[in-house]
């Protein structure tokens, strides 16, 4: 599927949604199926509400038009339907990006860099005192991402990563001294 095919499919899905033949959840599920991967391996998705293109830059979804692409709206999209024909929103749609620093998560997108399993392992095997903050920040990252706050989720992932590495580092230092002291006590020094 290319960008133009995805645009046509999006227009058809939005008409079905406006006519009441498609729920918001069904619309989001269909939009996941019409994501487009460009020749550089970047994934692109249409915004549920606005129809604008977003691409995933590795950590956040950024609004931008696809490369070498100009959108040509279909005649049905050029004329918005009368207000009384639009059903009320079933639930709040994802927010639209307003600036380069305001990140938007596509509906159903995975939490990038989810560190919960590693944080639990570092807490149990390395250093509980510094592993617990890693767990707390991992939980925050997941909840913020599910709420659509990608910027907050990214910051929580960074904090979890810092505490994770501190925990692993302290654990390795602790194991090193444990074995040095253990080896020296068996040799009689």
Image (cartoon, rainbow, N blue to C red):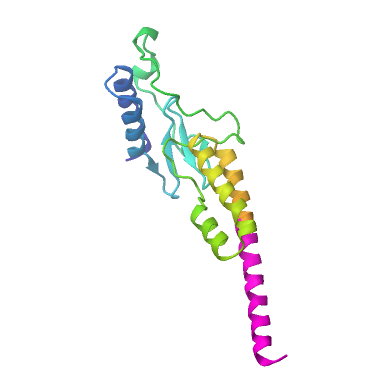
**Residue 69 on the magenta segment:** no
Q: Main secondary structure of the magenta part?
A: helix
Q: Quadrant of residue 26?
A: top left
Question: Which residue sits at x=48%, y=34%?
Answer: 65
Q: Is residue 94 above or below residue 88?
A: below
| 30 or 136: nearer the viewer | 136
Question: Which residue sits at x=48%, y=37%?
Answer: 146
Q: Quadrant of residue 31?
A: top left
Does residue 155 appear to the left or right of 47 in the view shown?
right
Q: Is residue 122 above or below residue 30?
A: below
Question: Which residue sits at x=36%, y=7%?
Answer: 84
**Residue 184 on the magenta segment:** yes
Q: Residue 35 location, x and y as percent?
A: 37, 39
Q: Is residue 185 above or below residue 44?
A: below
Q: Quadrant of residue 69?
A: top left
The magenta segment is: 164-189
| 22 or 3: nearer the viewer | 22
Does residue 102 appear to the left or right of 15 in the view shown?
right
């Amino acid at each position: 599927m290319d960008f133009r095919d995805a645009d046509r499919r999006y227009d058809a899905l939005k008409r079905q949604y406006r006519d009441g033949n498609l729920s918001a959840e069904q619309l989001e599920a269909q939009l996941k199926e019409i994501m487009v991967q460009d020749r550089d391996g970047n994934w692109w998705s249409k915004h549920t509400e606005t129809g604008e293109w977003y691409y995933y830059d590795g950590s956040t979804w950024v609004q931008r038009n696809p490369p070498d692409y100009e959108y040509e709206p279909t005649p049905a999209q050029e004329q918005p339907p009368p207000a009384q024909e639009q059903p009320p929103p079933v639930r709040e749609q994802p927010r639209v990006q307003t600036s380069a620093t305001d990140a938007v998560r596509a509906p159903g997108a995975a939490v990038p860099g989810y560190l919960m399993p590693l944080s639990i392992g570092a807490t149990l095997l390395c250093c509980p005192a510094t592993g617990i903050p890693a767990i707390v920040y991992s939980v925050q990252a997941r909840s913020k991402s599910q709420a659509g706050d990608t910027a907050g989720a990214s910051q929580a992932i960074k904090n979890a990563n810092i505490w994770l590495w501190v925990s692993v580092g302290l654990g390795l230092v602790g194991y090193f001294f444990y074995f040095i002291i253990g080896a020296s006590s068996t040799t009689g020094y």
